[in-house]
Amino acid sequence: MTQNSQPLDNPKAERINGIIKGEFLDSYNLRGLDDAREGVRKAVALYNSF
């Protein structure tokens, strides 16, 4: 992530964010911030296990 919110400044971080949002979190039924945090935790753990 960058200070200026410029996606081209850090393509690796932006790609990981896109993967987490597009491929993992879309399949979860998120009802609030706590659900989102848990979903991200699970997505990162699953992504890192491959």
Image (spheres, rainbow, N blue to C red):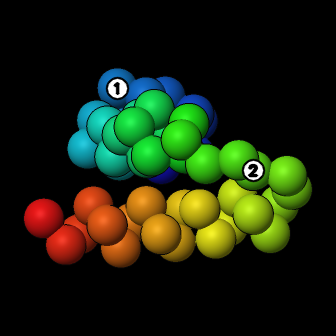
Does 46 appear above or below 7? below
Across and down, in percent, residue 44 comes to 39, 66
Q: What residue type is labelled 2?
A: Leu
Q: What residue type is labelled 1?
A: Leu
For this rendering, which residue is in front, 16 or 44? 44
Does 30 appear above or below 37? above
- Residue at horizontal 52 percent and vertical 72 percent from the top: 41
Relative side of 45 to 48, left or right: right
* Extreme-right residue of the structure: 32
Quote the CA–CA distance across marks 2 and 1: 29 Å
- Residue at horizontal 45 percent and vertical 46 percent from the top: 24
- State whether residue 42 appears in this view: yes
For this rendering, which residue is in front, 17 or 6? 17
Q: Is mark 2 on a helix, strand or loop?
A: loop
Does 4 appear above or below 46? above
Residue marked by disc 1:
8
Q: Is mark 1 on a helix, strand or loop?
A: helix
**Which label was assigned to residue 30?**
2
Relative side of 12 to 19, left or right: left
Q: Residues within 10 Å of mark 1 (few under 14, many from 20)?
A: few
Count of residue discs = 2
**Which label was assigned to residue 36?**
none
- Residue at horizontal 47 percent and vertical 69 percent from the top: 42
Rendered image quadrant of residue 27:
top right
**Quarter placement of the C terminus:** bottom left
